[in-house]
Image (tube, rainbow, N blue to C red):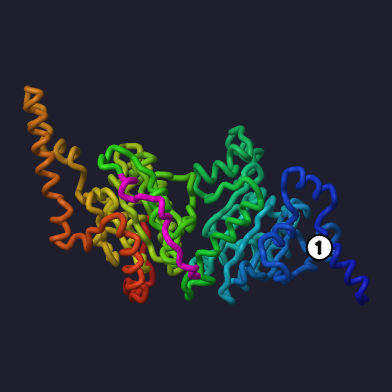
Amino acid sequence: MTLDGEALEQLRKRARAGGADKYHAANAAKGKLFARERVALLVDEGSFVEDGLYANALAEGLPADGVVTGTATIDGRPVCLMANDSTVKAGSWGARTVEKIIRIIERAYTTGVPMVYLVDSAGARITDQVELFPGRRGAGRIFWNQVRASGSIPQVCALFGPSAAGGAYIPAFCDVVAMVDGNASMYLGSDRMVEMVTGEKTTLEAMGGAKVHCAESGVGHFLCKTEAEALDVVKRYLSYLPGNWTQTPPKAEPSEAPGKTDLAALVPASERQAFDMRRYAKGLLDEGSFFEIQALWAKELTIGFGRLNGEVVGVVGNNSMFKGGVLFVDSADKATRFVQLCDAFNVPLLFLSDVPGFMVGSAVEKQGIIRHGAKMITAISEATVPKICVVVRKAYGAGLYAMAGPGFEPDATIALPTAKIAVMGAEAAVNAVYANKIAAIEDEAERAAFVTAKREEYERDIDIVRLASELVVDAIVEPHELRSELIRRLAAARGKDRHFSKRRHGVTPV
């Protein structure tokens, strides 16, 4: 076929227009943008260079084969991206769709730049299954490439509609997923398939909607009200990470911590009184820099990026506002993945400890709390980035280990003057050792006096000055001195040796 300039321009227009007008109108009614509008909102103006525009150009009704792929810059930094076009057969995958996605991930990996996935797809086209599903360049190759790229380049997903069946694994293999409430969903089988296979009657929203995955399953990381908000999440997430694993995170202009925050006043003297570790982190970090991840899931643990004097850090903090800050199965998984993310991309780790330990009881034992706890402790052990443990209020039992305590080669263990480090709290310890004796004391006043005396004895045994004298902690720091102490210590640790072990890889207690 020979094309003149006018014919080529018409071909381009048809490819860039997407599907029929009625599909554009249906999406607009749901508050959904056209795939190319999403790309334009995300990337720097004029920076997008598209590949595969003419994929399936000879077929009827398959412009670009339903996916937009190419390179661009975001805030001046290069990225690769793909965007499903849901106006073309609901964004479903054909053979050329799959090939385009594979090629752009391969380009991101080989050039060492972040990969962005803008997902809105009904899954594979069953009519094309032989061409797209089983082969060496079939859909499985997408996931193989994602796994190969994991930890090598940042991978971030914004989910605007469905991500169905095997396609649901694209978000699952990303570092983080932003989901638009009301439109985004992930599921392996549709509601009709679920009823047919299991007899359960459900809906896509109840089974795999954005709220479900951001608050219950943990597959989603950010619940967004609008598509613009989801795209802003992508931009902000990438602003904390390097282009690839060989680089350092981008530095920002140093700024001060919020002057209004009194860190000492935030922490109650009584262990039984909760406080919000998110407020503590915000008061410690550069103003406005805290970027919380998975805020709705496993809330007893707070994770996120922030900056100290312009330098990126990853924060892991116990939040006593939720479940007393006790570590559960989900919070152990949440910490594991975030620690691995930071370690992969050279982000120093700051642990803010106020942990009573791991949860106990038959329910969590059946869920595998030991296995999940071991997974978290494995991630802490394997992380070779600079890491600092700050005991804000307490670190009890294996919680001390999970929060990068002294045995896990932190670059420093810092305690506030009110910090406590022990196998367990005084009340639990006295009851564990003297339960029978306490029960045998009939006089109430005598019993209370005995318990008080034993508690005081226990508190003296774990006195923070004693622990500092035994070199368990490296420094006791006043709250108002903590920020500057951290800045100096992280600067000193920046050039540390990152070697961990003589091996190929460990066997993770998954």
Left or right: 291, with 468 as reference point: right
Q: Identify the residue at image location x=70%, y=61%.
A: 39
**Stretch in magenta:** 250-267
Residue 123, given in percent of the width and then of the height, sits at 68, 52
In the picture, the quarter occupied by the C terminus is bottom left
Left or right: 377, with 141 as reference point: left
Q: Identify the residue at image location x=22%, y=63%.
A: 474
Residue 449, given in percent of the width and then of the height, sits at 8, 31
Q: Quadrant of residue 206?
A: top right
Residue 175, given in percent of the width and then of the height, sits at 52, 59
Left or right: 259, with 466 as reference point: right
Amino acid at circle 1: Arg
Magenta residue check for 233: no
Q: Identify the residue at image location x=53%, y=56%.
A: 176
Q: Identify the residue at image location x=30%, y=54%.
A: 479
Q: Which of 490 and 129 is in front in this view?
A: 490
Circle 1: element type: helix
Residue, disc 1: 16
Residue lying at the far front in this picture: please name it: 259
- The reply to whether residue 68 is in sight is yes
In the picture, the quarter occupied by the N terminus is bottom right
Compared with 220, 313 (above or below) is: below
Q: Nearer the viewer, residue 132 or 417?
A: 417
Magenta residue check for 255: yes
Left or right: 478, with 304 as reference point: left
- The reply to whether residue 170 is in sight is no
